[in-house]
Image (cartoon, rainbow, N blue to C red):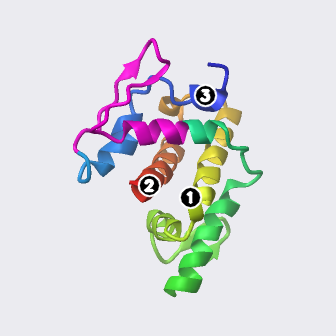
Amino acid sequence: MDNPFKNFFTNSDLLDIMVLRPLSHINMNWELTWGKNSEEYQRESDSFAPKLIELINEISETTPPAKYHDNEDCLAKYVIESLNWKITKKGNRWEGVDYESILEQGGFKDINEKNLVKAATGRIKAAIKRDQIHFDDMEESHQRMLAIVMVIIIYLRA
């Protein structure tokens, strides 16, 4: 595999715990198995593994945005305008509601999760730029946010 975005998720010890386990209330089979011959996770029909593989492929084919926070800000604008949430942006941070809720609720209006996928791609680009070339090696808070974005995408597509 020559794609750094695909390589980013190769044979991870944490990806299933951080991305699929939070969805275990929907599908209890959350553990991933790396298929050595296929160079991807095994596609178990009774799990979210196929959706995760599709998402990884989509991310690997998506051009990273210059500023991934702009894509996340689109979701915040939706919750302000459509849900009348009293959130405000102070510097680079949204205040008033936890960021995960903003992204999740905003994601319901994100057609094909376009902004969420761009945000995930941008977060990976930023990690790679900082020599964090694998999901398991990411700085913890950024790893958590990337995982949250991916959980939301898979949840919305379930």
Task: Assess disc 2: are there few (<14), some (14-19) or many (≥20) residues with their C-alpha within 10 Å of its C-alpha.
Answer: few
Quarter of the image with the N terminus is: top right
The residue that label 1 is drawn on is: 113
- Range of magenta residues: 28-56
Residue 42 drawn in magenta: yes
Above or below residue 58? Residue 99 is below
Task: Assess disc 3: are there few (<14), some (14-19) or many (≥20) residues with their C-alpha within 10 Å of its C-alpha.
Answer: some
Disc number for residue 133:
3
- Which residue is located at x 40 percent, y 55 percent? 155
Query: Which of labels 1 and 3 is toward the front?
Result: 1
Which element type, helix, strand or loop, lies under badge 3? loop
- Which residue is located at x 34 percent, y 24 percent? 33
Residue 21 drawn in magenta: no
Residue 17's image quarter?
A: top left
Give, as a three-letter code, the residue at label 1.
Answer: Glu
Disc number for residue 157:
2
Q: Position of residue 86 (x, y in %)?
A: 52, 85
